[in-house]
Each structure stands twice: as structure tokens, then as C-alpha cells.
Amino acid sequence: MGTTDVNGLTIAYQRAGNGPPLILLHGFICDSRAWQPQIDDLSRDFDVIAWDCPGCGRSSDPPEDYSMEQFAGCLAGFLESLEIDSAHLLGLSWGGTLIMDFYRLHPDRVRSAIIADSYAGWTGTVGPEAAAQRLERCLRESRLPGDQWIPQWVPDGFSAAAPQSLLADYAAIMSDFHPAGFRAMSRAVTPDFAHILPTIKVPTLLLWGDDDKRSPASAGKRMHDLIPGSTFNVIPGAGHVSNFEQPARFNAEVRAFLKRVSNS
């Protein structure tokens, strides 16, 4: 674990391995621990860096009106602090949306993009009415003790076949949520980011669990149709947090894609 200061915020991160830099961007209501299966495996081939996003894990809370553009600016500052000019970016769920806005602002800093079980913003994926309902729910539940809402959230992140021990491990990560960070990330992901997708020119892999209940595979297919030259692969037996439920298949897809990118 390490920390660095970016624009007045302390950003914590895990780092392991050597090779081309691979930045892991987690979803909301969790932190870099959700990437442990990827850190342990992909660090054999890459310099793997998994941050705790502002408002998560061991990082500082941002202001509650922090926009996705500001999160992207913080990510740029984070990379600068680690002296990384450009990197492969892998984002799950909220982290995938962050990749989109980061690419809009810093296209020269993205070697490739891997977007997993994500959204083109809630509005861009589920429409304005459903997005407003999601935001209202998140703002309300962020003010409650975790044991009053986490038990309802966790099962929706996994397939019906996922073992209870896996759900318990993920719930333990979620239980350390930051209320202010939860609200900031919820507001930031609400807008429509779909207009960015056709502008993405770097090699892009879209990975989706076949039993994703929060952002179904059809949403990933629509992103694939909008991102020129992108690849869309489905992971069997996985829900929304496909990296956590099926890590071996997820890691194999990521490694194969990055090797193709490196050899092209």
C-alpha cells in the first residue's frame, strides 16, 4: 500500500509487479480490495496499480459536488504523481465510466481501455427517469448504517450461483464505505456520457457478466456498437462484479487483450 497527495486529497493505492502500467479503477461503494484477484495475478506481467478513489478506502473524501470531470482530473494528477505518462486503464462499473471521461480529457494518456460491467453514465444507460431513481436511492441509503442496505445490494452484484462466502467477502469491503464519497460518486455518474463513446480511438475491450442485473449485457453491446473497433466479450457465470466472481476467466480475457495490444 502507498499514498500520494493530489490536489489536496490523499490518495491510497496498491501497487505490484513490473511491466507496462495497468491502472485498476473500482466501482463505487468499495475500494482497491475489490481488485485483489487481479492484483495477485496480473502483476506477473504488468505494473498493476489499484487506487482507492477519492471518497473510498483509505483515500480522502472529495467535496460532495465533485464531478466526474474532477475525478478524472484527480486520476490525471495521481498518474503524474507516480510519473506515469500513459497507461492501460481497466475500470469496473463506475470505474468504467471514469475511463470514458478521462479519455475525453486526456486521450494521449490512455494506451488501451478495458471497460467492464459499466455504464455510459446512468442516464446514458438506463434513461433519465431510472437514473434519477438510482440517485435518490443512493443519497438516501448513504445516510443509513450499512447493515440496513448492503444486504440488499450485494446479491444484485452476483449471479444466482455465487457462493455465500463470496458475497460475504464483498459485503465486508462495502461495509467500509464513506457516506460522503458514496454521495459524490453517485452524483458524478448520473449524467449521460454516451456521446464520448464514438470518440474513443484506442483499443477497447468490453467485458460483461452474462448475469449482470445492474447493467445488462445488452448495455455493453450498445457501447460496443458505439466504440469503433472495440471488442465485446461475455463472461459466463458472472454478475455485475465479474472480476470478483469469475477472476480466472476475467484475468485471462484481460491478459489476452493486452498481449494483442502490445503485439500490434
Image: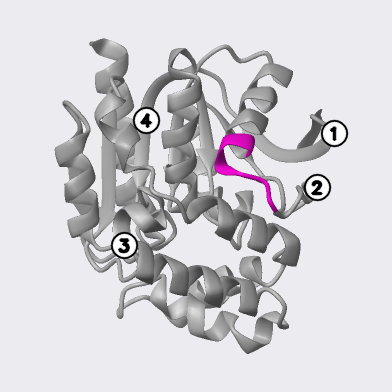
Contact, CB < 8 Å: mark 3 with mark 1? no
> Which percent across, then down, holds residue 155?
43, 79
Q: Circle 2 sits on which residue?
A: 60
Q: Quadrant of residue 151?
A: bottom right
Q: Answer with left or right where residue 228 lies relative to residue 167.
A: left
Disc 1 element: loop
Residue where numbered disc 4 is placed: 113
Query: Which disc, if any, is residue 127?
Result: 3
Q: Tell me if residue 66 is in the magenta stretch.
A: yes
Residue 93's disc is none
Name the spot of residue 21 as percent of width and height, x first.
Answer: 52, 22
User: x%, y% of residue 88?
Assistant: 44, 25
Name the N-terminal-most of marks 4 and 1. 1
- Tell me the amino acid under the disc marked 1: Gly
Say what amino acid the circle numbered 2 marks.
Ser
Q: Is residue 23 left or right of residue 148?
A: left
Residue drawn at the location 64% of the way across and 72% of the way down: 172
Q: Position of residue 81 (x, y in %)?
A: 73, 20
Q: Is residue 141 magenta?
A: no
Query: At 28% from the left edge and 20% from the top edge, which residue is drawn?
Result: 201
Comes first in the chain, label 4 or label 2: 2
Question: To which residue does mark 1 refer?
Answer: 8
Q: Which region shows up in magenta?
A: 65-70
Mark 4–mark 2 contact, CB under 8 Å? no
Residue 48 lies in quadrant: top right
**Where does the N terminus fall, quadrant-wise?**
top right
Residue type, label 4: Ala
Q: Which of marks 2 and 3 is in front?
A: 3
Is disc 4 in contact with disc 1, using a CB cutoff of under 8 Å? no
Task: Kindly report the distance in space between the C-alpha atoms of the residues bearing marks 4 and 2.
Answer: 26 Å
Q: Which badge, 4 or 3, is on the more N-terminal residue?
A: 4
Mark 2 or mark 1: name the one nearer the start of the chain.
1
